Amino acid sequence: MNHLDERKQTLKQLESTGYDVLVLGGGATGSGTALDASLRGYKVALLEKQDFSAGTSSRSTKLIHGGVRYLAQFHFKLIYEALSERKRLLFNAPHLVKPLQFVLPTYVWWEKPFFSIGLTMYDILAGRSVVPGHERISKATAIDYFASIKKEKLRGGISYYDAQFNDSRLNVTTIRAAKENGADILSRMEVVSFLKDSNGKIIGVTAKDLITKKKINIKAKVVANTTGVWIDSLRKLDDPKAENVLAPSQGIHLVFDKTKLPCRTAMIIPKTADGRVVFVIPWEGKVLLGTTDTAIQKIEEEPLPLQSEVEFLLKTGNDYLDTKLTKDDIESVFSGLRPLISTGGKKDTKSISREEAILVSNSGLVTMSGGKWSTFRKMAEDLTDKLISVGNLAKKMKCVTASFAFPGADGYSKHLVAKIQTMYDLSYETAVRLVDAYGGEVSFILGKNPKEIKKGSGYFLEEIKHFVKKEFALSVTDVLSRRWRVVFLDLKLAESLASPVANALAKELGWKDTEKKASLNELTSHIKDLKKTIA
């Protein structure tokens, strides 16, 4: 069965099936909830208006961490929970989530003992961890770890560990796992209204397929609103009198080539002009510098960085680096909107807790927002528990996601990179990318003789076929932004791969020329907009 036939079948299934749980929104929280509920034995459907992880869930700082900065705010419960989840993800998705060493530089005599006290608490909260604890390091060691660090007055620093990951790959892998465990999943589906019974209780939704333009009714015992920065829009669709609870803020990241910022580890900048920490992180062969915290009023599907944010990060980076960064050095940039819930009147987004919140409307709509990727599994567990209660669902199996192995975990090992490199005669960097994306499934996906979509690119046609068949890819942007991370890493490379990707997708999806051009234009327009912000 080809993808389009399968999609038609899923549409029929959605319209004819009565579901226990209907999840709206396919980011971190929604995908995690769909997986959790389906693994417990419930009949689950999930609708996503755009692509999975198209919003905030693909635009994170790429860290699975306890949150060192929360130590100063005494958020020990949040830190403990996040560090517990960090341990689980390192075991359950070892190809996607990996240990990452950090350097915290010190320039004043008292900083090293002061920071060491805080990181001792961090280690205690982590308990018996799979990553090393912190240690004080000399100036020479700090420079060895992070060669481009500012050396003037440097006294040394602290080394500690957290974990990093590929956010959109984890998101898509989670949604795929939900489908493989019985959930009905569909993207490009916009909810236009709620279905309610005579008592005003929600019993489903009317949704519009944005591809065929057809509207269908989908029935469910309970509906979850996990639409991130769009939660208030859904809440008002349910009840026009509902008050806004979202206090969104924007965070951006600048991307540089590793030759510009040579480093073996990540670095945390603990003091900045806007009161946040800033990270300098090696990721996917590049180096990320971020993030900002800018309160915003208007929510956009494709948020763009502000000039002031770009300048802030360049200045902050240059204050802690010997290498001086300019706009000309920026290879890409991405912006994400944090869906923070503020019900206490706080206006400063930096002071709003990142802990999640669950709201239940009079009609029974269950909304979850806040939180972060590090705790997404526990958030999904909590939300599924609430959905069972609100929907009065029969108790079935207990939550099992704490030990759930994600697709690709089976067969993954630290020796797999060398094996794949030799098997396909690849560069080390390409082998690392493939293994980190697919884990133990990499040779199955590539087959015997994989074909590069562009000679020397290190990206393969067989991957695109996998994205369409198993990972819900429907556009050039889906592939280059979220299945591959090229738009997030290198805008020039993304432009060069756009046409080959469009040609491959046209063949897989049976596009007409007009459909191919529209998908191609969507990507090139977005890249053009991004370039303007860093010009």
Image: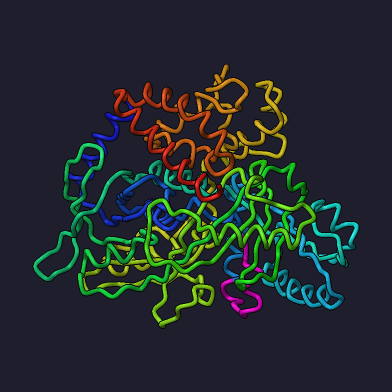
Q: Residue furthest bottom?
A: 344
Q: Give how far across and how far down residue 324 sits, in percent.
A: 74, 53
- If the image is split into quadrants, where does the N terminus sit? top left
Residue 154 locus on image (x, y percent): 86, 65
Q: Is 256 a magenta residue?
A: no
Q: Is residue 534 above or below residue 228?
A: above
Whether residue 518 is visible here, answered yes or no, is yes
Residue 392 appearing in the image:
no
Identify which residue is drawn at 19% across, 40% down: 213
Name the residue furthest left.
198
Q: Nearer the viewer, residue 308 or 200?
A: 308
Q: Which residues are magenta?
A: 65-78
Q: Quadrant of residue 15?
A: top left
Camera-side residue of 22 and 70: 70
Position of 504 with respect to 49 (left or right) is right
Q: Nearer the viewer, residue 227 or 254?
A: 254
- Looking at the rendering, which quadrant does residue 137 occupy? bottom right
Residue 83 lies, with reference to residue 487, above or below; the image says: below
Residue 347 in the image: above or below residue 523: below
- Which residue lies most toward the top here? 449
Q: Residue 22's image quarter?
A: bottom left
The residue lying at 62 percent from left, 36 percent from top is 433
Identify the residue shown where x is 66% and y is 27%: 420
Image position of 92 (left or right of 199): right
User: Is residue 90 placed above or below 353 in the rendered structure?
Assistant: above
Percent x, y for residue 374? 55, 60
Specify whether residue 68 is painted magenta.
Answer: yes
Residue 303, percent across and down? 44, 54
Q: In screen coordinates, is 377 left or right of 288?
A: left
Color encoding of the figure: rainbow
